[in-house]
Each structure stands twice: as structure tokens, then as C-alpha cells.
Image: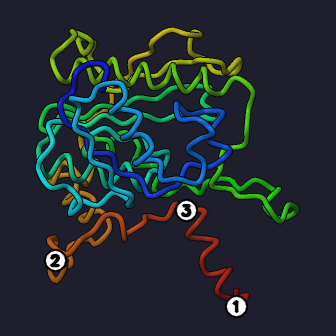
């Protein structure tokens, strides 16, 4: 972005740059132990001194932003963080682009949201709210294992560059510099290095998502409530938070009473 001439960027991230980041990040070993946002701000300033970079070492929170940006870019590999950015973008009517990966960055997944025009991030990824992320068994055997860190993989950096490059093509489209968003569908997928993925390798697969989730479409929320609450006249729609009302499937419904009976 600094190389493209973007005038002002705010970086938000709570972490320090760690040793395991070196293999998959533009920063170098000089930055280990220092805040990612501050190190990246210095890097951007060396590329383009005219690009004003604000570094905020915090988890994303809408109150951190001093002014309304023209575009929001989510690069967090976390559904919760992306969901917050999505809600913020919809509320402020700002376009947003979400970059993510499947597996060890073997498939790129880019979702962009233009409030009022496209489906939102939750329309596409809402199912992830209820999906438990499988745990690596090393967490039980290796005392130093940290499951928040993606294990090292030779060549991962090249995959990350491709994901970031693809996400940037969408950004160029959203800011009007290139005609990249002419395909119908706001989800871009690319099989970079997964031999078992059904998508053609190294080709763009554009997916269309059905618009209408409880976050971006109020009528959908009402429908959901009707299904679950029936005709209870005491139900107050304005108090409903879809994030706190996880719908259980049949299997989970069956498991529920069993667990409580065993006193776990
Ligand atoms: Zn939605």
C-alpha cells in the first residue's frame, strides 16, 4: 500500500513479532520481540515517507479509530476478529476486504464486502461461529507447544505472498485503481498448493454467496427468531444478539443432556 501511494494507513494488531514469524513475514529477525505494528510502520516509512502510518498495538476495537477510513482490510486469521471488522464496516458503510487461508496457506480465500451491495462476511463465513477448531494433539505432549502459532512449513512465505497479492488486487478494485471486481461473486478462492483441493491450481475461482444473514439483513433475523421463539409475544427483537444465541443441531441437542447428567 505504501508503494501504491496510499496516503494514510492505521495498523491495528496486539502482538509482538515472534521468531516463528520470520519465515512468513516481510519483517526480519531484527524485529523479533518488538511490536509488529511499530516495526511495520517503520518499514512503510522507509518505502514511502509520505505515507502516514499510525501504529496501534491493540486488538481491533472500533473506538481505536480516530477517523472514519475509506477502506478496512482484515488480515487476521480469526473469525472473531473478522466478524468485528464486518460489523464495523456494515455500521459505517465502508467497504471491507477479508484475507484468509485454508490449511497452511495452501488455498487463498478473499472476501470483499460493499455494504448495501454485496453479501457480508457473515453471510459467507457465519457457519464458522459454531465450528470448533480441531486441536493439535501436540498440545498434550509438548510443554512448549503454542497452538496459536502456525507451525513452520518450508515455502510458506511464497504462499503468503500470493494470498496477500490476491487480496491487494481486490483492494485496487475497491479503491477504483483497477477493474478487478467485474466478476459476479464477492468471494475469491485460489488453490495455491493443495493437491486435494478440487479447484484448478493457481486459477481464480469466484464464488457467489446468497445475501441475507442475521447480521446484515434484519428480515432474516426476524425469520430466525420466528423459527426459534415461535409466537412468543414477549420476545424482544432489539435485545437479540446472534453471537450469543448459538443454534444447536440435532446431534448437539442430544449430547447436551448427556453431558450434564454425567456432571461434567
Ligand atoms: Zn450478511
Residue indicated by mark 1: 263
Q: Residue at x 28, y 72 (%)?
A: 229
Residue indicated by mark 3: 250
Q: Secondary structure at mark 1?
A: loop
Task: Of the two numbered discs 3 and 2 on the same chain, state the one appearing first in sequence.
Answer: 2
Task: Of the two numbered discs 1 and 3 on the same chain, state the one appearing first in sequence.
Answer: 3
**Residue 255, relative to residue 215: is it above or below?**
below
CB-based contact (under 8 Å), mark 3 and mark 2: no
Q: Secondary structure at mark 2?
A: loop
Q: Residue at x 60, y 30 (%)?
A: 105
The x and y percentages for residue 247 are 43, 64
Q: Nearer the viewer, residue 136 or 13?
A: 13
Q: Left or right: 118 with respect to 250? A: left
The x and y percentages for residue 112 are 29, 31
Mark 1 vs mark 3, CA separation in Å = 21 Å
Quarter of image, ligand 1: top left
Amino acid at each position: 500500500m505504501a508503494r501504491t501511494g496510499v496516503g494514510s494507513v492505521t495498523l491495528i494488531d496486539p502482538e509482538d513479532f515472534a521468531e516463528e514469524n520470520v519465515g512468513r513475514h516481510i519483517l526480519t529477525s531484527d524485529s523479533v520481540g518488538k511490536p509488529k505494528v511499530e516495526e511495520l510502520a517503520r518499514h512503510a516509512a522507509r518505502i514511502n515517507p509520505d505515507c502516514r502510518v499510525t501504529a496501534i498495538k491493540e486488538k481491533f476495537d472500533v473506538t481505536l479509530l480516530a477517523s472514519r477510513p475509506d477502506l478496512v482490510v482484515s488480515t487476521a486469521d480469526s473469525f472473531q476478529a473478522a466478524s468485528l471488522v464486518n460489523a464495523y464496516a456494515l455500521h459505517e458503510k465502508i467497504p471491507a476486504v477479508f484475507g484468509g487461508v485454508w490449511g497452511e496457506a495452501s488455498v487463498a480465500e478473499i472476501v470483499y464486502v460493499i455494504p448495501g451491495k454485496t453479501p457480508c462476511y457473515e453471510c459467507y463465513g457465519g457457519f464458522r461461529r459454531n465450528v470448533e477448531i480441531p486441536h493439535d494433539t501436540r498440545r498434550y505432549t509438548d510443554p512448549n507447544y503454542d497452538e496459536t502459532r502456525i507451525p513452520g512449513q518450508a515455502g510458506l512465505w511464497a504462499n503468503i505472498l500470493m494470498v496477500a497479492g490476491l487480496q491487494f488486487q481486490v483492494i485496487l478494485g475497491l479503491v477504483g485503481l483497477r477493474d478487478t471486481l467485474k466478476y459476479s461473486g464477492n468471494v475469491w478462492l485460489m488453490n495455491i498448493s493443495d493437491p486435494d483441493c478440487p479447484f484448478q491450481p493457481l486459477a481464480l475461482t469466484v464464488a457467489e454467496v446468497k445475501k441475507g444473514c442475521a447480521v446484515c439483513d434484519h428480515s432474516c433475523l426476524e425469520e430466525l427468531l420466528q423459527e426459534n421463539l415461535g409466537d412468543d409475544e414477549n420476545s424482544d427483537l432489539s435485545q437479540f444478539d446472534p453471537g450469543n444465541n448459538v443454534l444447536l443441531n440435532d446431534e448437539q441437542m442430544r449430547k447436551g443432556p448427556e453431558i450434564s447428567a454425567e456432571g461434567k
